[in-house]
Image (cartoon, coloured by chain):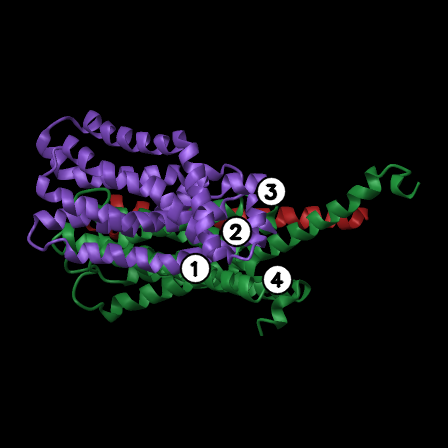
Amino acid sequence: MSAFDSWAAMGGYAEFVWPAYAVAVAVLGGIAIQSWRRYRASVRVLDRLQRDR
Amino acid sequence: MSAHLGLLRRELLLAWRQGGEIGLALGFFVLAVVLFPLGVGPEAEILRRIGAGIIWVAALLAAVLSLDRLFAADHADGGLDLLALSAMPLEGVVIVKCAAHWVTTGLPLVVLSPFLAMLLNMDTAALPVLTLGLLLGTPALSLLGAIAAALTLGARRPGVLSSLLVLPLYLPVLIFGAGAVEASVGSTGARAHLLLLGALSLAALPLAPLATAAALRQALD
Amino acid sequence: MISRLANPARFMRLSGTMLPLFAAASALVLLIGFYLALFVAPPDYQQGESVRIMFVHVPAAWLALLVYLLVAMASAVALVWRHPLAGIAAQAAAPLGAAFTLVCLVTGSLWGRPMWGTWWVWDARLTSVLVLFFLYLGYIALANAFDDPGRGGRAASVLALVGVVNLPIIKFSVDWWNTLHQAGSVFRIGGPTIDKSMLVPLLVMACGYLLLFSTLLLVRMRTALNERKARALQLAAVPAASAPPDASPVLR
């Protein structure tokens, strides 16, 4: 068992530790992406409206 | 004071004349309780163990269903604007409406509960604690429910929304009410639970109308 | 300082310059935090490597509660002092708080599973966080339930204040309920006190979460202000486009 393998196995708890970190990254990353995309959309819409005035 | 009594009389009269609506909430209460033996099986031992919880949860749900009676009709026909413009403080109006709501919804739940407890094979020794707990807790349900009812006036889907808003507020009442019955058959006794229930209702009496009146003012702007 | 930030235009300028800094700081601190949590922190003598879940779970719980308190404070400022940006801040923060709450619940479930053998543990902390999740959902639902967004924001502000008063009562009653029904099962983090080697990654992750929250709060507030301005521009354009040539019968 290589050092990476034994680290990845997390002492037998891998099936709990890795999903936990994955969920944290997914949820927080997800809301970050959603927030950013909505922000960019709001900037585009506002720019277009201000140009058309 | 006579204005408040007059309003109370009007509320009770309206509720009496629309008796069907009160009957609906009570009917739901009984039906919800009856669902549980059908769901978990008729084993007497299991029902006795979870009986207090079932009755309390059903009471909460029945209370939630009846909340739209508090303000929606008056809001729709302009009666609420008149009440807000009257000499009575809006908080006083709220207290009167909650009192009428409790008399027409909470009190009947309290009266029905011993019979439903017998349906669920609960200990007769637990019945007084159950009934007293509901008596002490149902005023809080009316008062806290008024907050949710006022906040959702004019919203899309006010019924479902106010249910979502009010159930977290109801949690302490549920925990102490159902816990009182459990404690009474155990060694600790129900006194602390019942005192806490009373305290919740007493604390809600001045505080809930404050929040409710603030919400009503927003709805009437 | 708060009143100096009341001007939306000034807020947009300030937040525009601070946003990249916050974003960079959060990315950096989170990376360091993850590294410390996954590589440097030692395994627990009782829970082994599963204790690493604590480093994503506990800071999420802290943020879940902190953000709710911030939402309540901003709501109070919006209602009492009518600060123009306070309501926007509260509504921008609430979905972020709900996200942290969700992370806390799921990671808590995963942490408890190897210890208790069940996918959910009705212990006092997790149950309280579950109720907090519903408080967030209720707030967000109410704020979005009205056709007039201003009305929704004001109603939600009242709800937030009611919720924050109710929160200690809920916590007390859930603790009470828990001690009645479970003979003192404690979700302790291994040992009576946290060792320093575990405290540092925990605090770093907490800082990272806080910086991430601040960054996303600025983003969402800027979005809200942009959308508000866009709505105003669209509304102003309507009468000019659709007004009939003679629209004043009263003057006839």
Res. C65 image quadrant: bottom left
Q: Secondary structure at mark 3?
A: loop
Spot the purple chain and give its letter: B
Spot the red chain and give its letter: A
Q: Mark 4 — on which chain does it sit?
A: C
Q: Do discs 3 and 4 belong to a common subunit?
A: yes
Task: List the residue tagged with mark 2.
Answer: B216
Count of numbered circles on the image: 4
**Residue C203 appears at what percent x and percent y?**
34, 66
Marks 4 and 1 sit apart, C-alpha to C-alpha, by: 19 Å
Task: List the residue tagged with mark 1.
Answer: C67
Q: Quadrant of the N terminus of chain B?
A: bottom left
**Residue kind at label 4, given as amino acid type:** Pro
Spot the green chain and give its letter: C
Task: List the residue tagged with mark 3.
Answer: C147
Mark with earlier residue (3, 4) = 4
Marks 4 and 2 sit apart, C-alpha to C-alpha, by: 22 Å
